[in-house]
Amino acid sequence: MFSRVILFNKFLEKDIKMRDVRVGDVKISEAEKSAINRVLDSNWLSEGPQVKQFESDWARYVGTKYCIAMNSGTSAIIAGLEAMKHCEHFPKANEWSKVITSPLTFIATVNSIKLTNYQPAFVDVNMDDFSLNAESLKEYLEKADVDDYSAIMPVHLMGYPCDMNKINSIAKKYGLAVIEDSCEAHGTKYNGKRTGSLSDFGVFSFFIAHNIQVGELGAVTTDDLELVRFIDKVKAHGRAWDREGQEEAVMKKEKFHNTEHEIDQHPRYYHDIPGYNFKTTEIQAALAVEQIKKADWIIKRRLENVKYLNEGMEKFSDILKLPTYNEDVSFLGYPFVIKDQSKISRKKLREELVTRGIETRPLFGAIPLHQPVYSYLRKEYEGKIPNAEYLGAHALYIGCHQYLTQEDLDYVIGAFGEILGKV
């Protein structure tokens, strides 16, 4: 705090105003306020018409037949992984089987694998865009006992898409399911199709820090109706439920009885598999419905900001590796990597940025090497995921969100110039 006060005084002497440049920001529009008020006026807060509208709108936007709303992206991964165990066309989805994923991701990806009694396995990532390296995946599986594996979960980190054609081809060869963690890639395209539509199923998070932001909300997107039906069960306590509204068919098909005599029962209170409570609310869904309408604007503004920052930060490219610009990417943030450790460390750079009012985040860390909860895997992966290890220690990001002004962006570029001695 003391250093920030001193620096602030220096800014005053230069007649430069200290700014507050956040990783993300939220502004609730009048349309969104009206949508929330309509929900409140309806006296219907649990899942109802707004949730159905969101599911329809998001499936259409992503390009899948179905969308299932959840209370979070983490819940979406868990529900999908649990549902796979009950689907006949995922015969390898057994407990204790392995799911291959990225070591460079938010912890929820790996926690979801572990909490559903699968085992996480890791292959390295690409330095340029943090995506799962398809060649590393191929080499890994060539040496593995593939009977121990059930799925591959590529992560579209920071909005960058993984090479889904290669990953799907490898998965098909070994009979593995493919799950897209698209929590950070709302609207990103790969070969003309949006992420979340390129695999057996995709998962999304609408957390407050993401591009479409409603506080807490998640979704699964898929074309697989059998999977949808089991996800619906998993998200609602494992109850016998049919999203197509065929309650009578369910009632006739099932034998509602106990050990002594048949009893009157209803699918809402009849449970044939274990499940969770992952349902969401009408308020979150109503916010999402409104935000989907401006999704393309959000992506466009973020792209413009990344391009502007890249042009202004090019003079630092001997010290920093700047993000690869791609118009198909829906950027979650402005990620970059420190190339020259002799000039500045990540810790020092983050400290200097924070004192100038610029919020930063490290890029998560390589999970089996840097996260204590998975330290039991450290020996297994030491030296085997060098790109993820380097990025986990030296990559970070700042904001590129749609509410930043040109003055904000110029301020950021100027701050980097001061810190790196290149004003």
Image (spheres, rainbow, N blue to C red):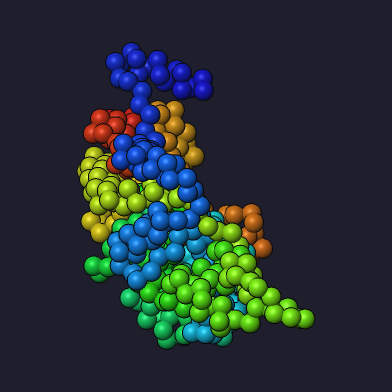
Q: Which residue is drawn at 49% across and 48% down?
A: 45
Q: Nearer the viewer, residue 68 or 423?
A: 68
Asked where in the image residue 108 lies, by quadrant, the reply is: bottom right
Q: From the viewer's perspective, is 220 left or right of 251?
A: left
**Residue 272 seen in this snapshot:** yes
Q: In this view, does 179 lie above or below 54?
A: below
- Position of residue 243 measured from the top left corner of the image (x, y, whole percent): 46, 69
Q: Nearer the viewer, residue 203 or 351?
A: 203
- Position of residue 134 measured from the top left corner of the image (x, y, whole percent): 39, 73
**Residue 417 seen in this snapshot:** no
- Position of residue 161 measured from the top left corner of the image (x, y, whole percent): 34, 63
Q: Is residue 287 above or below residue 76?
A: above
Asked where in the image residue 398 lies, by quadrant, the reply is: top left
Q: Which of 169 and 237 is in front in this view?
A: 237
Q: Is residue 205 above or below residue 333?
A: below
Q: Which residue is drawn at 34% across and 39% down?
A: 34
- Position of residue 351 measured from the top left corner of the image (x, y, whole percent): 47, 33
Q: From the viewer's perspective, is 196 left or right of 2?
A: left
